[in-house]
Image (cartoon, rainbow, N blue to C red):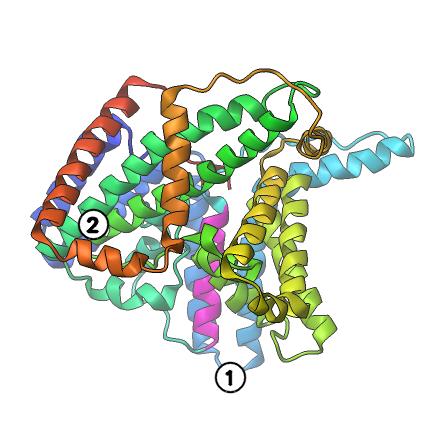
Amino acid sequence: MLFHTPIFLFLFLPFLLLTFYGMHSKWRNYVLLGWSLLFYFWGEPRFLPVAILSSLVDYQLTAWMFKSRGTPRAKVYLSLAIAANILLLVYFKYMDFLFGSTNILLTYFDILPLPLLNIALPIGVSFLVFEKITYIVDVYRGKGPPVDSVKNYLLYIFLFPKLLAGPIVKYHDIAEQLRGHHQSIYNFLSGFKRFLLGVIKKVLIADTFAEVADQIFNLPAGSVGFSQAWLGTLCFTFQIYFDFSAYSDMAIGLARMLGFKLMENFNMPYIATSFTDFWKRWHISLSSWIKEYLYIPLGGNQVSPIRVYFNLWLCFLLSGLWHGANWNFILWGAYNGIFLAIDRFFWLRFSKQLPPVFNVAVTFFFVMLGWVIFRVTSLPHMGHYFSALLNPWQEGTYIYMTANQWTAIVIGLVLCFLPLLSKFDTMVASWRSSKTAKLVENWSLVLLSVFAIFKAVSTTFSPFLYFRF
């Protein structure tokens, strides 16, 4: 169920709000849990029982682990709980990928291939597993006691705004809110405005970029020329940012309407001055998860320099694998890991001597190349596409661009790079302090969101890119 579809906007959300706010506060978590389970059941009816059963196993193992703290049994329960979640992820997301990769070797040695299981990938399974592991590890580390009820634990896992594509929420960041989240008119209205902003970004900007990016990336091999390849790269670079940040805006806004505060997931990532800076701004909840639950346990900065470089590379290699069971995602993770290691090795020190605008341009250029690896559908596709990117004389199929698509490119460039202006923060603060500005912002938001909803209703719905992960 997409947030910008009529069934969500005109049925699910109004009835949810009506029943949620119509109940006494002590019953609201039950109401919200019921609606969240219905939301997930709508998209993944077959996987919901598995997800609930897995969550109940986590809840019980973690309770036993907490009671056994300080003894060897606690580590046993910790290992069992983490292993159960990893096996769940491996089975649903990676089993056919592992079998398919193994079959390549078996075919080479004339051995009969393994039969593929053709397992359907449940929506949001990666986000579910990461949050479940977060809870288990946080309790083991003593960051707080286990959740006080099964109901609140299931609500933490299945809270519908962040259920399918994050932000990834750490249990200790939301534990107090689960016990007593606060609703107010201000929170509700600010959340509603944030939700509408996400609808606008998704429908009017991200989906417009998707039209061009999909057209170019879906061209047959040899049909992509130099200019088309760079146009497709630029459009996908903007598409994935506006698409994913739109979902985060909607998730944060919906949660705020219900009295929950989720962490911010983006902070103007395309003005980053290095890959290290980029990953502090892009998918912040994933970056912080990798740091806290992978990088630091591997030794963090407290090991030899060579080990630090390797740990950085390994963490982002695994991040690429987390994004999808395909070699292009693994290469994309390794690609980012290499640049993070280069940052650590010398670039962060050396780049301080260079103009910030130059650092932004270099980082954006290599981030775009990374998005090509992320977007292609196969290794041969990657080879053909990079061949077009690197050959200025290669001609391809003519791509007709509509006025809306050119407008989207201009808007994308302005929104992503306007913050580079030295007085940007001052101008924004000055603008927002005036009553006229607030009136213009509110009316613009209303008009654009109405237009976006009409467009969403009248065209084919485009799912969020991160739903596949």
- Which percent across, then down, holds residue 163? 37, 47
Q: Nearer the viewer, residue 53 or 366?
A: 366
Residue count near mark 2 (Cα–Cα under 10 Å), binned few <14, some 14–19, many ≥20:
many
Residue identified by numbered label 1? 70
Helix, strand or loop status at disc 1: loop
**From the viewer's perspective, is 136 left or right of 345?**
left
Residue identified by numbered label 2? 191
Image quarter for residue 233? Answer: top right
Q: Nearer the viewer, residue 342 or 320?
A: 342
Image quarter for residue 145? Answer: bottom left
The amino acid marked with disc number 1 is: Gly
Residue 367 appears anywhere in the view = yes
Q: Identify the residue at image location x=28%, y=36%.
A: 199
Q: How many marks?
A: 2
Image quarter for residue 7? Answer: top left
Relative vertical location of residue 162 with respect to residue 260 in this rendering, above or below:
above
- Which percent across, then down, holds residue 367? 57, 48
Relative vertical location of residue 408 with respect to residue 350 in this rendering, above or below:
above
Give the mark nearer the N terminus: 2 vs 1: 1
* Labels 2 & 1 near each other (Cβ < 8 A): no
Majority SS type along the magenta span: helix
The amino acid marked with disc number 2 is: Gly
For the magenta stretch, what is the residue range? 126-141
- Which percent across, then down, holds residue 215? 53, 21
**From the viewer's perspective, is 165 left or right of 306?**
left
> Looking at the figure, which quarter contains the N terminus?
top left
Q: Is-magenta flag for residue 385?
A: no
Mark pair 2, 1: CA separation: 43 Å
Q: Identify the residue at image location x=69%, y=67%.
A: 309
Residue 462 appears anywhere in the view = no
Q: Identify the residue at image location x=19%, y=65%.
A: 180
Q: Is-magenta flag for residue 127?
A: yes
